[in-house]
Amino acid sequence: MPPNGAQDPEEREIFERLLTVSTDSAWAVCSSLGYPNSFIEGLTAVRPDRKMVGRAITLRYVPIRPDVRDQQTALGSAINKRAVELSGPGDVLVVDSGGETGAGFIGDVIATRFIVRGGAGMVVDGAIRDLHYLRTVDLPIYIRGAHAAGSGRRIIGVGLNEIVRCGGVAVVPGDLLLGDAQGVLVIPRAIAREVADRAYATEHKENFLRATLQKGFRTIDECYPPSEEVLREYEEYRKQNPF
């Protein structure tokens, strides 16, 4: 299967490249392209050892009230079940729970179905259940908290695949999500290729600069930012080690 379930050659290339870069480098490109408010704040990585790249399926939850609950019940399956059945390889569930940590939007059983469907991760501005189990699965998960209670205690799902707010960032269905130990970056699809390529170029140069510093004969002022001499050395290195 292509990396994280990328569905076409171009998306596959973007996914592969994003998997090699940090959220720092990618954020710098997003910011330069007019998207400085793209890093989701306040979430914790359940599996900080796992990188995540995928496309957003969005869910929106609001505080529970009887009439809204009755309207949603009339639709049949709960929104988290509908989202999971809609998902496929490379999809990331992005959940706007308004920061509510007094109830979990999903637990181990529904999450198992998401994993089987090829899900690439979860980004939750709220809580999940069954953390004891979900921290053992091979799935990147970012959360504000965890709680033993299900969603019915405090929240009700009302929106699927609409623009949501997650950790202070607007997320549009189909946006790409890049996650590492530091957190999650939202990348609009229209700029994803440029973000991936420019962030990769940044990582390539900074890897060289770190290696140069580790040799011990260059000062930080010579390397960061690189002097003209160090830049010439980098260009020679780049010829031998192209992107």
Image (tube, rainbow, N blue to C red):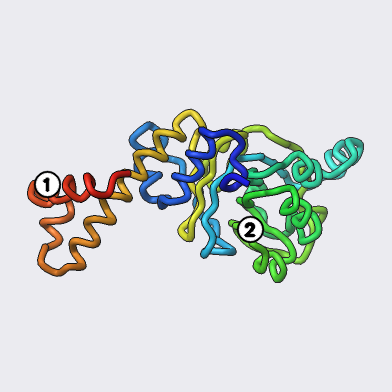
* Quadrant in the rendering for residue 27: top left
Looking at this rendering, what residue extends furthest in the top direction?
A: 190
Residue positioned 44% across, 40% down in the render: 37
Left or right, 90 with respect to 225, comes to right
Residue positioned 72% across, 36% down in the render: 160
Nearest the viewer among 71 and 181 is 181
Q: CA distance from mark 2 to mark 1?
A: 42 Å
Q: Which residue is mark 1?
A: 232
Q: In the rendered structure, which amino acid carries the disc numbered 1?
A: Arg
Looking at this rendering, what residue extends furthest in the left direction?
A: 229
Label 2 CA crowd tier, 10 Å (few <14, some 14–19, many 20+): many
Element under disc 2: loop
Q: Which residue is mark 2?
A: 139
Whether residue 100 is visible, yes or no, is yes
Left or right, 46 with respect to 238, comes to right
| Rendered location of residue 187, percent (x, y) | 48, 38
| Rendered location of residue 70, percent (x, y) | 89, 40
Q: Which mark is residue 34?
A: none
Q: In the rendered structure, which amino acid carries the disc numbered 2?
A: Leu
Identify the image quadrant of the C terminus: top left
Q: Does residue 66 lie above or below 43 as drawn?
A: above
